[in-house]
Image (spheres, rainbow, N blue to C red):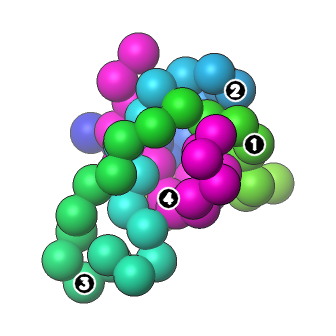
């Protein structure tokens, strides 16, 4: 399940599951649609950081569509 670690796999408008900063300990996943990709590097070991359309920011753990 490393698809969320590579920037090339993530596109604006994609439905994803992210872990918010406040949920990192519990690992709770929040679902939404990507509005902006915030990570500039091509990969990140903890997941690419994105902003969802509702304004929440977190690292991608799963790509849903």
Task: Identify the image quadrant of residue 31.
Answer: top left
**Mark 2: secondary structure:** loop
Q: Which residue is mark 2?
A: 12
Residue at 64% across / 40% down in the picture?
53
Q: Give the CA distance from mark 1 to mark 4.
A: 12 Å
Q: Which residue is mark 3?
A: 25
Magenta span has 53?
Answer: yes
Q: Which residue is mark 1?
A: 36
Q: Which residue is mark 4?
A: 59
Mark 1 closeness class: few <14, some 14–19, many ≥20 residues within 10 Å? some
Reply above or below: 31 against 51: above
Residue at 73% across / 45% down in the picture?
37
Residue 43 shows in the view: no
Mark 2 closeness class: few <14, some 14–19, many ≥20 residues within 10 Å? some
Q: Give the CA distance from mark 4 to mark 3.
A: 13 Å
Magenta span has 1?
Answer: no
Name the residue furthest left.
26
Name the residue furthest right.
40
Which mark is first along the chain, 1 or 2? 2
Q: Give the CA distance from mark 3 to mark 2.
A: 27 Å
């Amino acid at each position: 399940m490393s698809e969320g670690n590579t920037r090339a796999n993530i596109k604006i408008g994609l439905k994803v599951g992210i872990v918010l900063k406040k949920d990192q300990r519990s690992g709770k996943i929040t679902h939404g649609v990507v509005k902006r990709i915030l990570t500039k590097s091509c990969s990140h070991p903890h997941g690419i950081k994105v902003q969802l359309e509702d304004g929440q920011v977190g690292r991608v753990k799963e790509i849903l569509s």
